Image: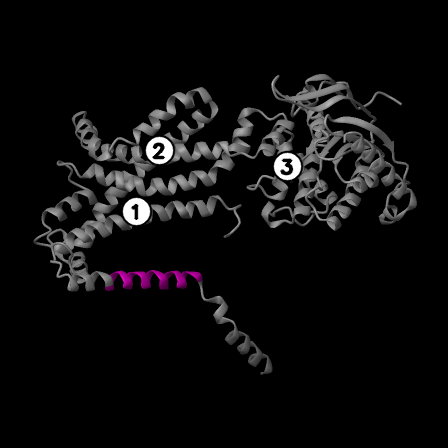
C-alpha cells in the first residue's frame, strides 16, 4: 500500500518534465495559425477587402469540401497534387543525381571547375518562367510524355543547390583527416569514399532540403503553360481564372501546393535524421 | 648498436620562396634505435612537428636524407611502417570508436575476419573496452585521444610517430595518459618518436630526449634519461627526475639567451 502511494507521488511529480516535444510544436503551430486567422479576418473587416481579393477563411474551407461531378474538391486537389508530386519526385531525383555528379567532377578536376562553374551559375540567372513554356512546348512536339517536361524543369531548379553545397562539402575536409589518409597510403578513391563523401553528407542534405521545395515549384511552373491538363499548377490557373465567381478555390489550390512543398521538405528532413546520425543533437 | 630504425641526416626544411623564406629546420641529424622512446622537446617554432612530418612523408625536406628501416619515407609510408597520432584526435565523426579504429585496416585491405579481434585487443589496451559503439562526440577529449592511439596501433606498425598527442588535455588526464602510453610501449615494444613542449612529460616518458631550439630549428643537445623502469607515479617525485628536468630546462634557457 505504501509502495503504491510513493509510486503515485512520483507519477504526480513527473508530468511537467515529460510534456512531449510534439505537443509543444503542435501548440505553437496552432497559435501561429490563430494569429494569422485573426490578422486575416480583422484586416478584411477593417479595410473592407472584397472576397475576390481576400476571401473569408470559411470560404476557403468551403471550397475544399464543395462537391463536383468528379467528387469533392479536396479529392480532386489531392489527385492533382499527387500527379505534381510524381513530376517533382522524378525531377528531384534526376536533378540531385546530376548535381551530385557535377559536384564530384568539379571537385576532382580543378581545371574543369574554373571553366564549367560560371555556366552552372549562369543557368540559374535565367528566369525559369521565361524558358518553362519553351521546354514544355518543345518537348511536347518531340513526342515526350507530358510529365517529362515538368520533371525537367523541376530538375533544372534542383541541381544547382546540390552542385554548390556538395562541392563545398567535398572540399571542407579537415586537413589532418586528409593527412591521416595519406599516412595510410590511401588511394584517391578510398579518400573519396571514406572521407570526402561522408564529410559532404550534411552539406548534401542542406541542399536537398532547398531542392525538395524548389522541385515542387519547378513542376508547378511547368504546369502553368496552356495545354497542360493535370497537376496542381493547372488548378492554380483555373482558380485564378474563376476567382471572381469562386473566391475560395484559388486559395485552396495554393494551400494544396504549400502542403506539397512541406511534405517534400519533411521527407528529406526525415531521411537526414535517419542517415546523418552521428551529429550531436542541438 | 645495430642499424638505426630511424635515421635523419643533415636535414633542412625551408618554407616560402626566394623573397620570403623561413628556415624551419637547419642541418638536423638524428638516429633512433629500435625500441627506443625518443621525445623531441622545444618551444613552438623549433621545427619539432615539422621534423615528425618529414619522417612521416607528410611533407618533403628541402635537403638531407631520412630513412625508416632503411627505406625512404615515401616507401615506408607506402609499406605502412609507421602509425601517426595527431595533436587533435582526428577521429571521423560518422564512425563509431570501433569503426574509427578499423579505418587503417579497411584502407589497407587487411582480411576482414582479423578486424574484430585486433580492434577488441587494441581498444582494451587503451582502456576503451566498453566504448566500441560510441560516436566521437560522446567521448571526453582524453578518451578520443585513446581511440586515436588504438587506431594507430591497430595495424601493428613498428614505429609510432606522435605529434603532441596530449597537448590539449588537462594536467591530470595527461599524466594518466602518460602512464598508459608507457604501458603500451612496454607491452608492444614499438619505437616511439614523441613530440611535446612539456619538459616533464618528455623526461617522464623517454629513454632519450632531443632538445631543439628555434629560428632556425636545430638539435641543441641529446639527453639520455636514466630513470629506472618501470616508471611510476613516484618517478615524478624523485631527485633524479628533477635533476634531468633542470638539465633540459638549462639547455633551453642557454639557447634562448644566446638568441637575444
Q: Nearer the viewer, residue B83 or B38?
A: B38
Give me the disc on residue A261. Answer: 1
- Give the residue displayed 61% in from the left and 30% down from the top: A179
The residue singled out by tag 2 in the image is: A160
Q: Nearer the viewer, mark 2 or mark 1?
A: 2
Q: How many marks?
A: 3
Classified by dominant secondary structure, the portion drawn in magenta counts as: helix
Residue A207, position as x, y percentages in the image: 39, 39
Do discs 3 and 1 share a chain?
no
Quadrant location of the C terminus of chain B in the rendered image: top right
- Does residue A92 appear anywhere in the picture? yes
Quadrant in which residue A231 is drawn: top left
Residue name at image x 56 percent, y 79 percent: A4
The relative height of residue B28 versus residue A220 in the rendered view (above or below) is above
Residue A24: say if magenta. yes
Of the pair A88 and B12, the residue shown nearer to us: B12
Residue at mark 3: B102
| Residue A127 vertical placement versus A10 (above, below) | above
Tell me the element at label 1.
helix
* Left or right of residue A3, residue A22 in this image: left
Q: On what subunit does the disc labeled 1 rest?
A: A
Residue A90 falls left or right of residue B166:
left
User: What residue is rendered at 35% in x and 36% in y?
Assistant: A93
On what subunit does the disc labeled 2 rest? A
Amino acid at each position: 500500500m505504501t509502495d503504491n502511494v510513493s509510486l503515485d507521488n512520483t507519477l504526480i511529480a513527473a508530468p511537467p518534465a515529460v510534456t512531449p516535444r510534439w505537443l509543444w510544436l503542435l501548440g505553437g503551430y496552432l497559435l501561429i495559425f490563430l494569429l494569422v486567422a485573426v490578422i486575416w479576418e480583422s484586416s478584411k473587416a477593417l479595410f473592407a477587402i472584397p472576397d475576390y481579393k481576400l476571401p473569408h477563411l470559411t470560404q476557403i474551407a468551403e471550397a475544399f469540401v464543395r462537391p463536383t461531378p468528379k467528387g469533392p474538391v479536396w479529392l480532386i486537389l489531392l489527385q492533382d497534387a499527387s500527379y505534381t508530386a510524381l513530376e517533382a519526385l522524378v525531377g528531384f531525383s534526376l536533378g540531385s543525381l546530376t548535381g551530385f555528379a557535377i559536384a564530384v567532377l568539379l571537385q576532382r578536376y580543378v581545371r574543369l571547375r574554373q571553366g564549367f562553374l560560371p555556366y552552372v551559375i549562369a543557368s540559374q540567372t535565367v528566369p525559369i518562367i521565361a524558358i518553362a513554356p519553351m521546354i514544355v512546348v518543345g518537348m511536347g512536339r518531340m513526342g515526350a510524355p507530358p510529365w517529362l517536361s515538368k520533371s525537367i524543369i523541376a530538375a533544372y531548379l534542383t541541381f544547382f543547390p546540390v552542385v554548390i553545397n556538395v562541392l563545398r562539402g567535398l572540399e571542407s575536409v579537415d586537413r589532418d583527416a586528409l593527412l591521416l589518409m595519406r599516412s595510410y597510403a590511401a588511394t584517391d578513391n578510398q579518400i573519396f569514399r571514406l572521407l570526402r563523401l561522408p564529410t559532404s553528407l550534411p552539406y548534401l542534405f542542406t541542399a536537398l532540403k532547398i531542392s525538395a521545395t524548389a522541385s515542387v515549384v519547378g513542376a508547378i511552373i511547368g504546369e502553368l503553360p496552356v495545354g497542360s491538363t493535370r497537376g496542381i499548377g493547372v488548378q492554380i490557373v483555373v482558380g485564378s481564372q474563376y476567382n471572381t465567381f469562386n473566391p475560395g478555390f484559388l486559395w485552396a489550390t495554393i494551400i494544396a501546393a504549400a502542403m506539397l512543398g512541406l511534405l517534400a521538405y519533411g521527407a528529406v528532413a526525415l531521411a537526414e535524421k535517419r542517415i546523418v546520425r552521428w551529429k550531436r543533437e542541438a | 648498436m645495430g642499424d638505426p630504425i630511424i635515421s635523419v641526416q643533415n636535414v633542412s626544411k625551408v618554407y616560402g620562396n626566394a623573397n620570403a623564406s623561413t628556415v624551419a629546420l637547419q642541418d638536423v641529424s638524428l638516429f633512433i634505435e629500435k625500441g627506443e622512446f625518443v621525445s623531441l622537446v622545444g618551444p613552438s617554432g623549433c621545427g619539432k612537428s615539422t621534423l615528425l612530418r618529414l619522417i612521416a612523408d607528410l611533407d618533403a625536406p628541402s635537403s638531407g636524407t631520412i630513412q625508416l628501416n632503411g627505406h625512404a619515407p615515401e616507401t615506408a609510408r607506402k609499406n605502412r611502417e609507421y602509425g601517426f597520432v595527431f595533436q587533435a584526435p582526428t577521429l571521423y565523426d560518422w564512425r563509431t570508436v570501433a569503426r574509427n579504429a578499423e579505418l587503417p585496416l579497411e584502407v589497407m585491405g587487411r582480411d576482414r575476419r582479423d578486424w574484430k579481434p585486433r580492434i577488441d585487443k587494441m581498444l582494451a589496451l587503451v582502456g576503451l573496452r566498453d566504448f566500441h559503439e560510441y560516436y566521437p562526440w560522446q567521448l571526453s577529449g582524453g578518451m578520443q585521444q585513446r581511440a586515436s592511439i588504438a587506431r594507430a596501433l591497430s595495424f601493428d606498425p613498428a614505429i609510432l610517430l606522435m605529434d603532441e598527442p596530449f597537448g590539449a588535455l588537462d594536467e591530470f588526464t595527461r599524466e594518466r595518459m602518460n602512464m598508459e602510453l608507457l604501458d603500451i610501449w612496454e607491452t608492444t615494444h614499438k619505437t616511439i618518436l614523441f613530440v611535446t613542449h612539456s619538459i616533464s612529460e618528455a623526461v617522464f616518458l623517454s629513454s632519450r630526449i632531443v632538445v631543439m631550439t628555434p629560428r632556425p630549428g636545430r638539435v641543441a643537445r641529446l639527453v639520455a634519461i636514466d630513470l629506472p623502469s618501470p616508471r611510476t607515479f613516484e618517478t615524478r617525485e624523485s631527485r633524479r627526475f628533477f635533476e634531468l628536468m633542470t638539465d633540459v630546462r638549462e639547455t633551453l634557457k642557454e639557447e634562448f639567451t644566446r638568441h637575444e
